[in-house]
Image (cartoon, coloured by chain):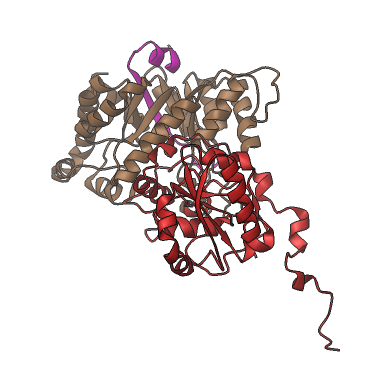
Amino acid sequence: MSLQSKLESGKFAISCEFGPLKGTDTHEIKENIEILKGKVDAANVTDQQSSVMRLGSLVTSALCVQGGLEPIFQMTCRDRNRIALQSDLLGAWVMGIKNVLALTGDLPALGDHPQAKGVFDLDSVTLLQAIARLNEGFDLSGNELKGKPSFFAGAVVKVDSNTEAAAELQIAKMQKKITAGAKFFQTQAVYDASTFGKFMKRVEKYKVPVMAGIIPLKNAGMAKYMNANVAGVHVPDELIQKMSAAAKEDREKTGIQIAADLIKQMKPMCQGVHIMAIGWEKKVPEIMAVAGL
Amino acid sequence: MILSEQKPFEEIVAYLEKDKAVFIMGCHGCAESSGSGGPEQVEEMKNKLTEAGKKVTGTKVVDFLCGKALIKSELKGKIDQLKAADAVLVLTCGIGVQAVAAAVNKKVYPGCNTVNLGGSRGEWEGSERCFECGQCLLYHTGGICPLTACTKSLVSGACGGANNGKCEISKDRDCGWELIYNRLKARGQLSLLADMMKPLDHKKIMPRPEMMSTSRYALENSDKEVKAQ
């Protein structure tokens, strides 16, 4: 069953995420595809994540299609203008890619080519508008297409913010993304089910499926790093202490257990879960098993 | 020199849809030499808005509207007229609009678009920056420019990268969209956050070819050379 059919029929959907590596070696991508296909409903393929140049998400998504794993083609507005974005969308459809996740993208200054020009000709909202337009059979300038796609478009939203302005701006933008054509949302990593519950109460009126973001903790240092540096991610002290207290050989098990517990707590509140394993892609089936998915 | 040109009158009237009374401001500097916001254009705008059924509570043309200190001192005698207005219409470049929006606690609307001259700033350099985008969006953003205040020049809202109100690029830079949110909240205009924005028109942002080699100052056009040979 496709991600779209699953979310549209109200079934709980599971997605995960992996990023292509720098270079032409595709062994790891193919290994991940073999491990994840048949287990998750779809896998996000990141688009030069953190502005670090690598193999692209379009080609890697096409490899997923060929390997039998449904991809969610992540597309940022950082590196391409509206001509290239629309052209790559047409290309994605031709390669059998159905799901697109529209993102604004990080600044190039944060990546490994800090001198690069950030394009941002479109942003996440106007990219969603472009996708909707292509689905209708026209480009952004109103020219008719010969053969049109039928993308299932999604977007992201942050659950937790540390200022009122940031929180309200997230909700305002979520509404705009829905108006622009977003049919599902994946969230930034959540580590507190009650915060997530409050967020879901606020957005349930939009009736758009939300997939809760999960990043399994590998150690306490990772949690502290995210608290200090990643906007909208807050790992509670209690979980950091659990990771610190675990013996080195038990750390992995503890991290997986915390992720699984969070999934169990949040499952009744939302329509799916999005597991961002960051290098632990091969452990996704285990996280799912412990969470009872 | 910053070149501005008046927005179509229909666009200005649409901004004022919910407002009955308006105070108009112009500038004796660049806006006057642009023919977009000097005394003549301010008077003309006053008549047109009155004809359109708006009450113009007063007008003020300031020497350099890019100077907030100057704006504040020049407006001292106009407080009653300002208070009687629902909004302030500013017929200048984007810097003048932003300076008034920062100096006056009223809704402030742009009456002009600033045209790209290939890069320039206010005569009186404050913290406000104008992108010279030729499609002024300051109506929607509380008089704070999203193109210059947001590192990514995003028009649809915040990217989500801000932490404790600071941009992901630097802890020393405020998130432009959080500034916009706080301004809109203070002015009771938060509903503007729902406005769907079109992608920027980069054709308008590119300098027009004839603008790259001309000046609006007559003095600049003098063909007299300094006889140094």
What hue does chain A carry in this figure?
brown
Kindly give the residue lying farthest to the bottom in the view shown: B229
Q: Quadrant of the N terminus of chain B?
A: bottom right
Query: Does residue B223 appear left or right of residue B12 in this picture?
Result: right
Residue A164 placement (x, y as % from top left): 29, 44
Query: Does residue B161 appear left or right of residue A52 in this picture?
Result: left
Residue at 42%, 20% in the rendered image: A37
Residue B188 placement (x, y as % from top left): 36, 43
**On screen, A248 above or below A90?**
below
**On screen, B126 above or below A210?**
below
Residue at 62%, 21% in the rendered image: A94
Q: Identify the image quadrant of residue B166.
A: bottom left
Range of magenta residues: A1-23
- Residue A121 visible? The answer is no
Query: Does residue A98 appear left or right of residue A250 in this picture?
Result: right
Residue A123 placement (x, y as % from top left): 52, 39
